Image (cartoon, rainbow, N blue to C red):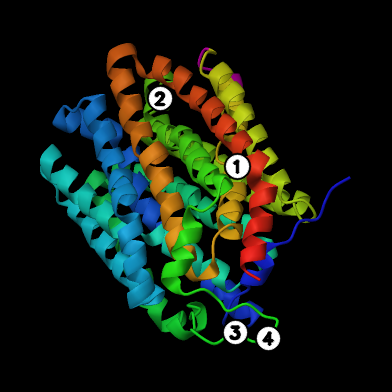
């Protein structure tokens, strides 16, 4: 019989109430900037074949151009997220969008590998804290019981942005050159960056932590610095960070290398390869939304079910993709790859809900910064780079055969977190009063 555990998230409702219609406007604009973020990040993958020929780059160099953005995100997300909490999330978001958009325009002006690497470094600098600060803004204006759905849907914006970046980038690059592809992504981001602070108001979306004397029968809310302790206070939240990061190693590799794989082994032209890869990534984004909604549905009465779902999704992804990349290039192979990608990033929603439920509202920006750090340093950054290194040595087809095996490690970590999640929720709920 399922046991209903105390819900720490229920005690963490937004400090500032906003109309639901305005909450969805906030979601739409923040989601739109996340799309811009990933369009600027992933347009590079669509022009891999063109850069490889024009500049004579190795697969390791191409992987580095992709991975350096995730590396910067991983290294800087936590300090910049803390800074955003002090200067204001809305102002920080607008500033970040301006930086990554201008850096993307710098990619269009690059004359060689070193220039492009510097520009990509700056793209990563601008994007470093956006995912964590953006999702903190989103969950601050919605009820706690929607956290897995919102996390999955919001993070799916990264994949939808990747779809648009690869598809539109591939088409623009084929007709107007790869420089025009980068310039188009930069223009889109700058427009949203200017619009955002005029619509999303700081006072409505950034809950304030007030130091007040405790009311009889009610615990005082902890201060900001004390709340930071919840970031790493339980085994299950640590497992959520690590499991999510390991699983996204697979997504990072697939995002970066799928256009090249289709170009080399399916004989597709760069524009067709980019559009086809974008379609596969779209499937993965849809999976993030679907599995996030499913996680919320099955965990209403027993929250550890979300962690169990994450274990299942990691195992399924590992099995499906390892089989798919051992098949000869064919339509059947693409269907099996699509099935694997549908579950590949599905653990994002459950892991995000775990992090939100096990940390204090006042530090959700920092909590998602830690999650972003793990996602990038364990997954999105090394995924493209290590896959490129394996591809140089053994071939891209062989490299992609073994990349999905990391899903087994992610499943094991989530399984460990599942064992302590219920107890940790009770502990957090008790400490919250």
For image coordinates 63% across by 51% down, the residue present is 424
Q: On the image, numbered disc 3 is attached to which residue?
A: 214
Residue 332's spot in the image, x, y percent? 61, 20
Residue 393's spot in the image, x, y percent? 28, 14
395 left or right, relative to 29 = left
* The label number, if any, that marks residue 216 in the structure image: 4
* Mark 2 or mark 3, earlier in chain: 3
- What secondary structure is marked by label 3? loop
| Magenta region | 328-332
330 within the magenta span = yes
For image coordinates 66% across by 71% down, the residue present is 433
Location of residue 1 by image quarter: top right
Query: Do tag 4 and tag 3 residues touch (Cβ < 8 Å)?
Result: yes
Q: On the image, numbered disc 1 is attached to which residue?
A: 346
Residue 383's spot in the image, x, y percent? 38, 32
Q: Nearer the viewer, mark 2 or mark 4?
A: 4
Is 213 in front, or is 361? 213
Query: Do tag 3 and tag 1 residues touch (Cβ < 8 Å)?
Result: no
């Amino acid at each position: 019989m399922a046991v209903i555990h105390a819900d720490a998230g229920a005690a963490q409702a937004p400090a500032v109430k906003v109309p639901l219609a305005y909450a969805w406007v906030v979601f739409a604009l923040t989601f739109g900037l996340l799309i811009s973020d990933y369009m600027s990040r992933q347009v590079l993958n669509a022009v891999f074949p063109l850069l490889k020929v024009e500049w004579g780059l190795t697969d390791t160099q191409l992987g580095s151009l992709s991975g350096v953005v995730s590396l910067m995100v991983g290294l800087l997300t936590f300090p910049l997220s803390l800074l955003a909490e002090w200067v204001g999330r809305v102002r920080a978001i607008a500033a970040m969008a301006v930086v990554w958009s201008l850096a993307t325009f710098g990619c269009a002006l690059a004359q060689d590998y070193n220039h492009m690497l510097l520009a990509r470094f700056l793209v990563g600098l601008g994007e470093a804290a956006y995912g964590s600060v953006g999702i903190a803004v989103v969950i601050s204006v919605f009820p706690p019981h929607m956290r897995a759905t919102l996390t999955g849907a919001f993070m799916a914006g990264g994949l939808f942005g990747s779809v648009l970046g690869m598809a539109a980038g591939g088409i623009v690059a084929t007709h107007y050159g790869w420089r025009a592809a980068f310039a188009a992504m930069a223009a889109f981001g700058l427009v949203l960056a200017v619009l955002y602070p005029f619509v999303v108001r700081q006072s409505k979306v950034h809950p304030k932590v007030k130091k007040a004397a405790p009311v009889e029968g009610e615990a005082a809310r902890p201060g900001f610095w004390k709340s930071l302790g919840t970031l790493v206070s339980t085994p299950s939240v640590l497992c959520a960070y690590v499991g999510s990061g390991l699983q996204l190693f697979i997504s990072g590799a697939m995002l970066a290398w799928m256009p090249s794989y289709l170009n080399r082994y399916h004989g597709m032209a760069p524009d067709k390869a980019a559009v086809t890869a974008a379609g596969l990534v779209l499937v993965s984004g849809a999976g993030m939304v679907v599995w996030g909604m499913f996680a919320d549905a099955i965990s209403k009465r027993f929250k550890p079910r979300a962690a169990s779902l994450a274990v299942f999704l990691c195992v399924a992804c590992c099995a499906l993709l390892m089989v798919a990349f051992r098949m000869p290039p064919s339509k059947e192979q693409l269907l099996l790859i699509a099935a694997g990608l549908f579950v590949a990033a599905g653990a994002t929603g459950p892991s995000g809900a775990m992090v939100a439920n096990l940390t204090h509202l006042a530090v959700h920006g920092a909590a998602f910064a830690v999650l972003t750090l793990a996602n990038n340093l364990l997954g999105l950054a090394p995924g493209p780079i290590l896959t490129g290194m394996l591809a140089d040595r053994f071939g891209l087809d062989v490299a992609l055969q073994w990349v999905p095996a990391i899903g087994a490690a992610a499943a094991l970590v989530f399984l460990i977190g599942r064992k302590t999640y219920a107890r940790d929720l009770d502990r957090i709920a008790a400490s919250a009063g």
